[in-house]
Image: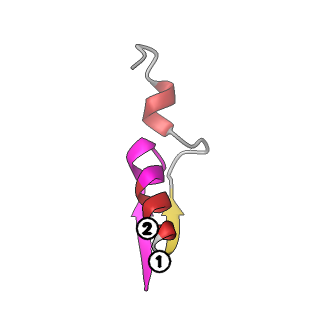
Amino acid sequence: MRVAVIGAGIRGLVSAYVLAKYGIQVVLYEKSHYFLGAHCNSHGGV
């Protein structure tokens, strides 16, 4: 089985990690040139 994860933010990366741990092939897509796109670019912090 192959799964596409759209977005390399916190949720996308964790989802891809968990799926891969279960032996599922994961393709991760991100529109930005940076991982954690909106999370790291939100200058307000979390």
Q: Amino acid at mark 2?
A: Leu
Judge whether 5 appears above or below 36 on screen.
below
Span shown in magenta: 1-14
Q: Residue at x 43, y 22 (%)?
A: 42
Does residue 5 belong to the magenta stretch?
A: yes
Point out the tag, 1 or 2, that comes first from the N-terminus.
2
Mark 1 residue type: Ile
- Place of residue 32 in the rendered image (x, y in percent of width and height, measured from the top left): 54, 45
Quarter holding the C terminus is top left
- Regarding residue 7, the answer to whether it shows in the image is no
Residue 19 in which image quadrant: bottom left
Rendered location of residue 4, percent (x, y)? 43, 70
Q: Residue at x 48, y 51 (%)?
A: 13
Please say whether residue 42 is visible from this viewpoint: yes
Which element carries disc 1, helix, strand or loop? loop
Q: In the drawing, what numbered circle is on residue 46?
A: none
Where on the picture, by quarter, is residue 1? bottom left
Query: Are the residues flagged by discs 1 and 2 in contact, CB closer than 8 Å?
Result: yes
Q: Residue at x 48, y 50 (%)?
A: 8
Describe the element under mark 2 as helix, strand or loop: helix
Pointer 2 residue: 19
Which residue does the numbered mark 1 point to in the structure image?
24
